[in-house]
Amino acid sequence: MESEIQALKNIKIGSLYYFIAIVLALVTESLAITIKSLSTSAAFLVLELIAYVILILGFSKLRVGFFTISKEINTNIGITGINIFIFGVIALLFSDIFSILLYLGAFLIVLGNVMIGLNIYKIGQNFEGNMEKVAGILIMITVTSFIGYIISYFASDELIKKVSQTPEEKPLQIVTTDKNVGYGILKSNGDANFTVYSKGVSEIVSAQIIGYNFQVLQISPKTVGPGENKIYIKFNLSGLLSPGNIYNVEILLANNEKLLASLVYEI
């Protein structure tokens, strides 16, 4: 939960920085058009530089936020979009030297905004935040992106409050008094950590989730001893399992003994 809150805080700050940078850039350009002499003055260059610095800081915050929340949501498209947008800005900076960079830069900025907006939309979808979803849509439409980012600022704040008020779920665990059946947890990434009981020392030959044909990628340790044994198995989960359900693992030993464990499935 703490990592989610920190990620949303970074997205919130990054969105605000972007909004400030765009407003500053628009005001500077408007003044330069109105006051012709300003476009070649040092003040104009300083204001433009400040806008670019704020923009880069904003996207740095967004990137950190996307990366932190990637444990919950696939944010690769958003991180890639930020990189593309920055390359677009760099291209525009050199467009006075190479005119083709003007078109390339504009294209990269539009593409970057679409990818970032899509990522913001996915975050809103994941946390059931309608405002964040609206922000994502507006960001994808480049001409309204600055409105989308200021909405994302307020929407992210709402999501932070929502996540903070959500009670943290304690992992489910099975504890059994039947020493013939072990217990533990099966994660959605295929990690199974559980305890089983054996009558003696023997090597583990194979393991399977009963009723499924998932490939076993790793077993540790390779042997069991008498009494309680803590086992880690990595399964290649390719089927749809239901969170909260119990799945039974069967381990076959070299001495033909079979060990059973009941695992709670968690995302």
Image (cartoon, rainbow, N blue to C red):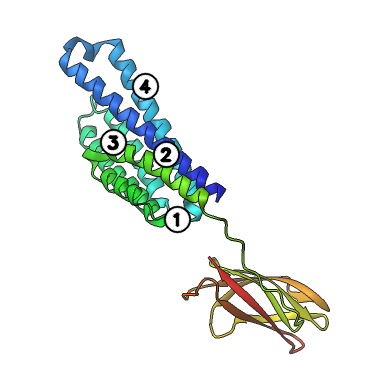
Q: Earlier in the sequence, mark 2 or mark 3?
A: 2
The mark closer to the camera, 2 or 4, is 2
Q: Disc 3 marks which residue?
A: 146
The mark closer to the camera, 2 or 1, is 2
For residue 50, the mark is 4
The image shows residue 218, relative to residue 133, as above or below, that is below
Q: Earlier in the sequence, mark 2 or mark 4?
A: 2
Q: Earlier in the sequence, mark 1 or mark 3?
A: 1
For residue 73, the mark is 1
Whole-Å distance between the Cαs marked 3 and 4?
17 Å
Asked if the residue at tag 1 contacts the one at tag 2, i.e. Cβ–Cβ closer than 8 Å, the answer is no
Q: Earlier in the sequence, mark 1 or mark 4?
A: 4
Quick one: SS at disc 3? helix
Specify whether 224 is left or right of 102: right
For residue 12, the mark is 2
Specify whether 195 is left or right of 15: right
Whole-Å distance between the Cαs marked 1 and 3?
24 Å
Whole-Å distance between the Cαs marked 2 and 3?
13 Å
The mark closer to the camera, 3 or 4, is 3
